[in-house]
Image: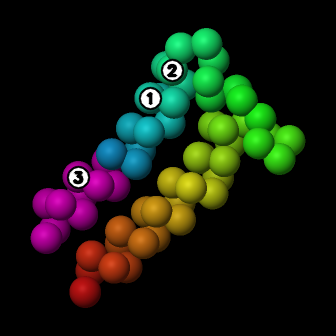
Amino acid sequence: MRPARSALLLLLLAGFPIIEALPADAGTIRVAGVSLLWWYGVFVAPALAWLVAVVLHR
């Protein structure tokens, strides 16, 4: 389970540059006044990382 947890966390880290590389500046689309990159970097990725660390730790 440990390699899977590490791979998922690395995948979450890779999400930010992947979103940035999307065509037509998709990462700059605004939701509730801030960009998708902000939502991913500040809310989505940390929340998912916490879930991966806590849920897969058991």
Q: Select label 3 or label 2 by which is in front.
A: 2
Question: Tag 3's secondary structure?
Answer: helix
Q: Residue furthest bottom?
A: 58
Is disc 2 surrounded by few (<14), some (14 to 19) or many (20+) residues within 10 Å? few
Contact flag, marks 3 and 2 (Cβ < 8 Å): no
Q: Residue 44: percent from the left, percent from the top?
A: 56, 55
Quarter the N terminus occupies = bottom left
Is disc 1 surrounded by few (<14), some (14 to 19) or many (20+) residues within 10 Å? few
Tell me which amino acid carries mark 3. Answer: Ala
Residue occupied by mark 2? 22
Q: Is residue 45 on the magenta stretch?
A: no
Q: In this view, does 21 lie above or below 52?
A: above
Q: Residue 58: percent from the left, percent from the top?
A: 25, 86
Q: Most prominent secondary structure in the magenta stretch?
A: helix
Q: Is residue 7 left or right of residue 52?
A: left
Q: Residue furthest right?
A: 33
- Residue visible at 46% across and 70% down in the picture: 50
Contact flag, marks 1 and 2 (Cβ < 8 Å): yes
Write down the region rendered in magenta: 1-10
Task: State the mark number for residue 2.
Answer: none
Q: In this view, does 38 lie to the left or right of 47?
A: right
Residue occupied by mark 3? 7
Tell me which amino acid carries mark 1. Answer: Ile
Distance (Cα) linking label 3 and label 2: 22 Å
Q: Is residue 22 above or below residue 9?
A: above
Q: Which of marks 3 and 1 is nearer the N terminus?
A: 3
Q: Select label 1 or label 2 by which is in front.
A: 2
Distance (Cα) linking label 3 and label 1: 16 Å
Q: Is residue 31 left or right of residue 51?
A: right
Q: Is residue 4 on the magenta stretch?
A: yes
Residue occupied by mark 1? 18
